[in-house]
Image (cartoon, rainbow, N blue to C red):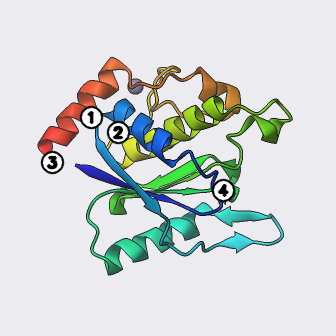
Amino acid sequence: MHIHIFWDSQSPSGFQVPVSRLISSILDVKTTVTENPVRIMGYVTARRQVDAQALLDSIQTYKHLHQIPEPVLLVVHQDLFRNGNIFVFGLARESVGAGVVSTSRLGNEYYGRQGSDDDYIDRIAKEGAHEIGHLLGLPHCSDRECVMFRPDTLDELDRKKKVLCPACREQLDTLLNAG
Ligand SMILES: [Zn+2]
Ligand SMILES: [Zn+2]
């Protein structure tokens, strides 16, 4: 199993390699990171946000056109929303192997705090690994330190460790071996 990470040009540059390495180590899967070839669709001017579902549509179309069977994670900097949510850190569409993560709310600067590359990289990796976990078949987990826990806030995201809990680890191993 091999995961494609598409890094949009507006996402923080220089983090591609550390983020993809961390995602590989969290999930124990291979990743490749390339410049994003997918069109950014779904910008809503009134919200200054991008509709995450429209982006997933865009990834789905690209995957179909270029016959990419493996999961794709798109990393964008635009703030994301979905119907019913003010914002989302990321979103996954398991049925087509497409996921998206926004770096918009993952930097300390967004919250008026002192910037830190390490914090930024850790958060993108945890969010990215979470969405890829869904694409590989993992559901949400109630362990607040597990990567598959669903965080509503930055503090909840920071509380998570860069690892799957033993139950999710075992489940992912089973899923990967079955595939
Ligand atoms: Zn989730
Ligand atoms: Zn778990």
Nearest to viewer (mark 4 / mark 3): 4
Distance between the Cα atoms at labels 2 and 3? 13 Å
Circle nearer the N terminus (2, 3): 2
SS for dot 3: loop
Q: Mark 3 vs mark 1: which is more N-terminal?
A: 1
Q: N-terminal of the two: label 1 or label 2?
A: 2
Residue at image mark 4: 77
Q: Left of 113 or right of it: where is 19?
A: left
Q: Are marks 4 and 3 in contact (CB under 8 Å)?
A: no
The residue labelled by disc 1 is 172
Sequence-first disc among 4 and 3: 4
Q: Are marks 1 and 2 in contact (CB under 8 Å)?
A: yes
As drawn, 41 above or below 34:
below
Residue 138 is tagged as 2
Separation of residues labelled 4 and 1 (CA atoms): 28 Å
Q: Quadrant of residue 129?
A: top left
Secondary element under disc 1, as helix, strand or loop, is helix
